Amino acid sequence: MATAPDKTRKLRKNSEPMDRDELRDAYANMLLIRRFEEKAGQLYGMGLIAGFCHLYIGQEAVVVGMQHCIGKGDQVITSYRDHGHMLACGMDPKGVMAELTGRASGYSRGKGGSMHMFSKEKGFFGGHGIVGAQVSLGTGLGFANWYRGNDRVALTYFGEGAANQGQVYESFNLANLMKLPVVFIIENNRYAMGTSVERASASRDLSLNGVPWGMPSLSVDGMDVQAVKAAGEEAVAHCRQAKGPFLLEMKTYRYRGHSMSDPAKYRTREEVQRMRAEHDPLDAAKKRLEELGIAEDELKALDNAIKARVQEAAEFAQSSPEPDPSDLFTDVLVES
Amino acid sequence: MTDILMPALSPTMTEGKLAKWLKQPGDEVKSGDVIAEIETDKATMEVEAVDEGKLAEILVPEGTEGVAVNAVIARLASEGGTASPAPAPAQAPSPAPAPAPTAAPKAPARHAPATPQEPAETDWGPTKTMTVREALREAMSLEMRADDNVFLMGEEVAQYQGAYKISQGMLDEFGPKRVIDTPITEHGFTGMAVGAAMNGLKPIVEFMTFNFAMQAIDQIINSAAKTLYMSGGQMGCPIVFRGPNGAAARVGAQHSQCYASWYAHCPGLKVVAPWSAADAKGLMRAAIRDPNPVIFLENEILYGHSFECPTAEDFILPIGKAKIERAGTDVTILAFSIMVDVALKAADALAEQGVSAEVINLRTIRPLDIETIVASVKKTNRVVSLEEGWPFAGIGAEIIATVVEHCFDWLDAPPARVTGVDVPMPYAANLEKLALPQPEWVVDAVKTFF
């Protein structure tokens, strides 16, 4: 098996742990995603959300930790498991939930659904339904930054399943050849639909998949929001200094099925329960917050405020009108 | 008290069997706990609790079949009254009502030109002779001088000066940041260009030939063409995909295919196929300025052909307008790209036999200039479509269906199609000639009308 040069394997500096306020923000952002996704699952069960619906529960630390490394003008792009990324980017839960229910007030005016939402204002470039396609697109987002000569960075997320697609490696080659500011983030949740990473990838360490192109990389505990942020800061700094792309492998886990109709027979109930009990990113952050002296009452109040926000989104998503039939024909082409 | 409802566990489930309860009344339930197993026609699925509290009562015993989605199956007592600010509605909600079945929605009229612009045949004043190759290069260079966001990328476009020398000299003028050599990696660089367009740039992507774009067609259709619609109008993709299309000469099946009908099939794309140098220059400028993805189908053989081309600084042609290359009264011949040459030769031959043929150069395949086509057919009452691509579901099929829909009563004869032969392109010189439309084929088709 290939081994990477040592320099690609260790954090260059020991990042400061998040302070109390930052960790509380991160916890709140993760909790918003968790509660939103639980509600989305519930609405799906009630028939209010249809089609494909891929929940992010379990993986919250990845996107929240990375979001703490970037700012306005940077770009984020991901696959179809995208609700968490949208919320982390600051998109309004009401608009996201209304898109899930297929309503006119959704981010794509009801024409995209769970897998296809965008917000240029928040730097979120989708939401893409073809496995791996967003990796080339994200490389192009970074290309535009390079072309303009600014220091912006494109965070390009994909799963360990997509990591077997040919265009991922075409993109690695292009990004390294042209020194494009792209952070490639593999969210390794261990299962590509029902196929475990061991059954799908001959590479036993996905963080080494960029080695042939000389791409620096880190393997990260994706269940620890502070570890994610520390690695993300190094990757983003590398890109901002015009040194080219960076690869992060986030070792994470999804608690729910691939989509809503997944009976999840490819893994044991015990495995899921063990991850939830021993590695939950929210539990870990909550425990740390308590150690930092945040009272349980305050955390409870936070939880209730987030639940109320999600409930408001759910009610908005159910009460908003469906798109007007005339919208069937709009947005096919930009009328010049 | 919170109702627990029978969940839908797949996009198509309407009812299921409550196979087993894993929690009993009095048990504490936490979010994420499995509370029951449900059998659908596809699988046995576990039901996880969403809310927290104590299971108060079970309303549907295990083993019950045919439990409707959204029926109340159990009740949960919430802890301390605070954990569940979001009780499910007491009455089982029903999914948003689908609109009652109605007649198929009516698309906006296709008569109107999709992009109303200045008349196609503006008099642009003085002309000079130039090749299609020079016209394409001049159009790209003019637009790149005018707009810093426009750049050219593709295989061999820069240092090699273009596989077909279209971009000759452009690296010198614009530098390596705007004339970019890519590795041979169509899928990757096409996706990268589409991402750059989503992020505000205006790429021109050269495919060495459109045959190689098949490696990248997912990015062209699923990413470039559909994202505007899927984003409710937010994410435009101003990009031009260009390169030689169709048969060249003796390059065999994998390098000799017309992709006009492949791309013209897809909403969200515009498809342009120039014939002359003026077409190439005017339409390329329009394609680069267009805020949508444009497929620009060139022809290798035409690159070296010379035509008169307007010299006016602001010369441009509208996408979506056909041009009458030769006026006539007895039959309309519709063609695009190099088949316009074949149509004009056929018209010469027909003139010798006393038949006056009108030749229309389509210029744009999508949106099709139905107005010009219909007006001509209403005048001549006979129509032949001519293309080098395959017949099945080809452009001719679409054109003739359109003619029949719009002017059936004006037709004096069944419309005719002349197409490339329905086989992969052979290599042998004699066989290749037999596979591609010749002027005589058009003459023969027209003669059946009289």
Image (tube, helix red, strand yellow):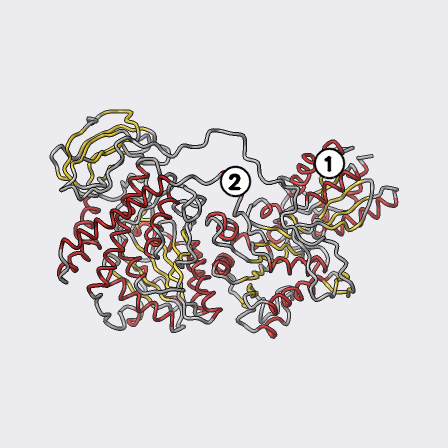
Asked whether residue B326 is in view, the answer is: yes
Q: List the residue tagged with mark 2.
A: A326
How far separated are the C-alphas under marks 2 and 1? 35 Å
As helix, strand or loop, the secondary structure at mark 1 comes to loop
Task: Report crowding for label 2: few under 14, some 14 to 19, many 20 or more residues within 10 A (C-alpha).
Answer: few
Residue found 61% across the figure and 45% down from its top: B261
Between label 2 and label 1, give the one nearer the viewer.
Answer: 2
* Side of B364 relative to B46 (left or right): right
**Chain identifier of the residue bearing label 2 in the image:** A
- Relative depth, front residue between B196 and B116: B116
On-image quarter of the C terminus of chain A: bottom right
Task: Name the spot of residue A331 as percent of width and height, x first.
Answer: 52, 48
Identify whether A218 is placed above or below A318: below
A167 to B411, vertically: above or below:
below
Chain of the residue that carries numbered disc 1 in the rendered image: B
For disc 1, the neighbor class at 10 Å (few under 14, some 14 to 19, many from 20) is many
The disc placed on residue B415 is 1
Where does residue B106 sit, x and y in percent of width and height?
57, 36
Image quadrant containing the N terminus of chain A: bottom left
- Whether residue B442 sits left or right of residue B290 in the image: it is right
What's the mark number on residue A51? none
- Quarter of the rendering containing residue A180: bottom left
Quadrant of the rendered image containing residue A244: bottom left
Q: Is residue B65 above or below residue A166?
A: above
Amino acid carrying label 1: it is: Pro
Q: Residue furthest left?
A: B26
Front residue of this view, candidates A35 and A299:
A299
Residue A273, position as x, y percentages in the image: 19, 46
What amino acid is found at the position of numbered circle 2 in the picture? Ser
Q: Are marks 2 and 1 in contact (CB under 8 Å)?
A: no
Q: Position of residue B220 (x, y in %)?
A: 52, 52
